[in-house]
Each structure stands twice: as C-alpha cells, then as structure tokens.
C-alpha cells in the first residue's frame, strides 16, 4: 500500500457493507476483530467477531482469517497490492451460527457467497453442463436450434429451466457418509434433516441387521446418531435420520444446506456452491421413471 493511500479496508456482511480504518503496522488480528465488532455492533447483536467469522477475498479466491498465521499472510498480501487494484483484499464477515438471509430478505450482492451465486455461468460452461447432457438436452442442432430460440423470443436458458421443472429433475451430488464413499445424494432443501434409506443403512451397518419395529422400526423418523459427510473437499458432521426413501440412499436436507451455506442458481440448476468454502460442487440432474417410463415426482 502506498504511503499516501487512506488506510481503509472494505468489509461486507450478508446484509451490509462498510469500511474501517486500518494500519498493517499498528493493528493486529485482535484489534481488527474489535474494529469490525464495533462497526457492526447492531447487526451482530453485540456479539464480538472471533475466529471463524472472517474471510477475505484476494485474487479470485476466498481465504480464511482465523489465526495469526492467516493474519501474517493477509498483511503480506495487502502490502503487495494497492487499494485501487482488483486484487486488494476485501473482508467478508458473518456469524456462522446465524442463517444466511433468504429471499425476500435483502442479500448484499457484494458478500462473497451472493457474488458467487449471482455470477452468470459462461457459455462454455453451459455447453459442458451435465444438465444439457442428461435431462435438458435441446432438440435439433447447430444453426437451426439457435434460430428456433430466436423466433419466439424466449431465451434458451429459460426454456431449458422450464423443461427441467416440467420433467421433475432433481439435483444430485456425489459424496461420502461415514465409511461409505461414492454415494449419490439428493439435494432437497425442503426436507429438514439428513436422511439415509433403510436399505442403505442395513447394507452398510448403520443399523443392526435384525432391526425390527420399535428398534429402528417403522415408528416414524429415528435418529441414528451423528455421521461425517464429505462433499467436495470438506467434511462436516450431521445428525442422520432413518427414512423410508426408496429412490435415493442419502438425502441432504436443510440442515446440510445451512451448515455448508449451499447456494443454488435458479437459472442454471447444475450450479451449486458451498458458501462456507466457496467451492463449486459437481451436480447432476436426475429424472426418475417407473417401469412404464412414467416420470416419478420426488416430493
């Protein structure tokens, strides 16, 4: 940072943006946390900013700012760039115990999670998306297809999304649960918890092989304990419930969405981002059909 530049840092939260005066020679990680706490006192309801709350964007990635080691790297990166550069570090602060705002609540577009969510997918990414290969492949080819899109004035992405909705496609991702790897999991924010099917639980020893009604039986939802779930590069632990879901081995509900800060794109159904790490998750759309070829709706 040049000596003549005003020593400020821009700070974004899920609902607001502000700036603080900062000196990389006089401040420390603790004083930085204190300044943010005072500035956002009302938003954080008087709670002090601490380790796990702060990240910063630098370059094209988002980095944790949790301890002295992170802070030394942050200071070096700040010194190596100018406030006028796009690469100059910008802070993002959130209490991880509070849920992210959801529409119609205000979402700060400068906060890194919402910025990632709002970035439109590139045309090349759309061409490669599995949604087009598996469930929303457009008919026709080349120039004729493009002309047809232009004729009725309806954008291609909107047609594909409407087709996805009409065909009852569901989002699925690959991950691991407990000792079991490469499990296809259904993403379903309308469900409250994380669930595994009875068949899957029996096969992999999550419940005893002699389970009977009243003992992991059909008496409603049964909590079978907390299990680690790995999606992408990150492992988190969740309370898991036994379910009678017949179509998917594992269903990741709202508890998973909130813990990993999962964001989905209403335009591109294969665009899934875990906001806690900023990692984009490989997603496939699946359309279920019964033996007669009729589409099965997952409610």
Image (spheres, helix red, strand yellow):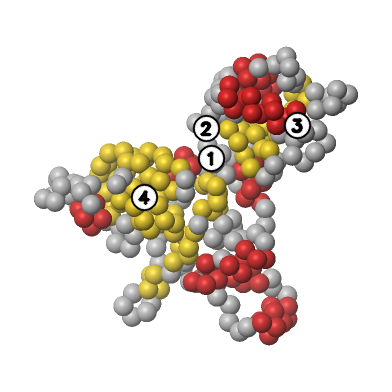
Labels 2 and 4: the sequence-earlier one: 2
Q: Residue at x 55, y 51 (%)?
A: 280
Report which residue position mark 2 lands on: 96
SS class, disc 3: loop
Q: Characterize the local packing of mark 2: few (<14), some (14-19) or many (20 or more) Cα atoms within 10 angstroms.
A: some
Q: Residue at x 61, y 33 (%)?
A: 55
Indicate which label's residue lies in the foreground, 3 or 4. 3
The answer to whether the residue labelled 1 contacts the one labelled 2, judged by CB atoms less than 8 Å apart, is yes
Labels 1 and 4: the sequence-earlier one: 4
Report which residue position mark 3 lands on: 80
Q: CA distance from mark 3 to mark 4?
A: 40 Å
Question: Is the residue 6 above or below the residue 127 in the image?
Answer: above
Q: Is residue 254 left or right of residue 26?
A: left
Q: Residue furthest top?
A: 26
Question: Is the residue 130 above or below the residue 68 in the image?
Answer: below
The answer to whether the residue labelled 3 contacts the one labelled 2, judged by CB atoms less than 8 Å apart, is no
Q: Characterize the local packing of mark 1: few (<14), some (14-19) or many (20 or more) Cα atoms within 10 angstroms.
A: some
Report the number of numbered marks. Answer: 4
SS class, disc 2: loop
Question: Is the residue 165 above or below the residue 179 in the image?
Answer: below
Labels 3 and 2: the sequence-earlier one: 3
Report which residue position mark 1 lands on: 276
Q: Quadrant of the C terminus?
A: bottom left
Indicate which label's residue lies in the foreground, 2 or 4. 4
Q: CA distance from mark 2 to mark 4?
A: 23 Å
Q: CA distance from mark 3 to mark 1?
A: 26 Å
SS class, disc 4: strand
Labels 3 and 4: the sequence-earlier one: 3
Indicate which label's residue lies in the foreground, 3 or 2. 3
Q: Residue at x 23, y 57 (%)?
A: 199
Q: Characterize the local packing of mark 4: few (<14), some (14-19) or many (20 or more) Cα atoms within 10 angstroms.
A: some
Report which residue position mark 4 lands on: 176
């Amino acid at each position: 940072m040049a000596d003549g530049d005003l020593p400020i840092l821009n700070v974004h939260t899920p609902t607001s943006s502000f700036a603080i005066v900062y000196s990389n020679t006089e401040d420390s990680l603790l004083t930085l946390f204190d300044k943010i706490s005072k500035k956002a006192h009302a938003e954080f309801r008087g709670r002090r900013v601490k380790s796990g709350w702060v990240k910063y964007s630098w370059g094209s990635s988002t980095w944790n700012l949790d301890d002295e080691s992170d802070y030394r790297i942050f200071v070096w990166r700040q010194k190596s760039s100018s406030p006028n550069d796009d690469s100059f570090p910008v802070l993002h602060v959130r209490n991880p115990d509070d849920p992210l705002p959801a529409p119609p609540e205000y979402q700060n577009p400068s906060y890194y999670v919402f910025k990632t969510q709002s970035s439109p997918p590139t045309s090349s990414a759309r061409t490669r998306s599995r949604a087009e290969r598996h469930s929303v492949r457009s008919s026709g080819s080349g120039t004729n297809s493009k002309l047809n899109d232009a004729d009725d004035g309806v954008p291609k992405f909107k047609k594909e999304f409407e087709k996805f909705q009409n065909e009852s496609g569901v989002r699925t991702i690959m991950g691991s649960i407990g000792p079991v790897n490469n499990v296809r999991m259904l993403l379903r924010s309308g469900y409250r918890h994380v669930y595994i099917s009875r068949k899957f639980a029996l096969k992999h020893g999550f419940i005893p092989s002699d389970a009977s009604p009243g003992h992991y039986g059909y008496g409603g939802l049964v909590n079978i304990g907390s299990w680690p779930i790995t999606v992408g590069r990150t492992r988190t632990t969740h309370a898991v419930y036994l379910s009678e879901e017949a179509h998917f081995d594992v269903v990741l509900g709202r508890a998973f969405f909130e813990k990993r800060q999962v964001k989905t794109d209403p335009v591109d159904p294969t665009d899934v981002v875990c906001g806690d790490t900023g990692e984009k998750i490989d997603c496939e759309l699946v359309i279920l059909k019964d033996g007669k070829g009729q589409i099965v709706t997952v409610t």
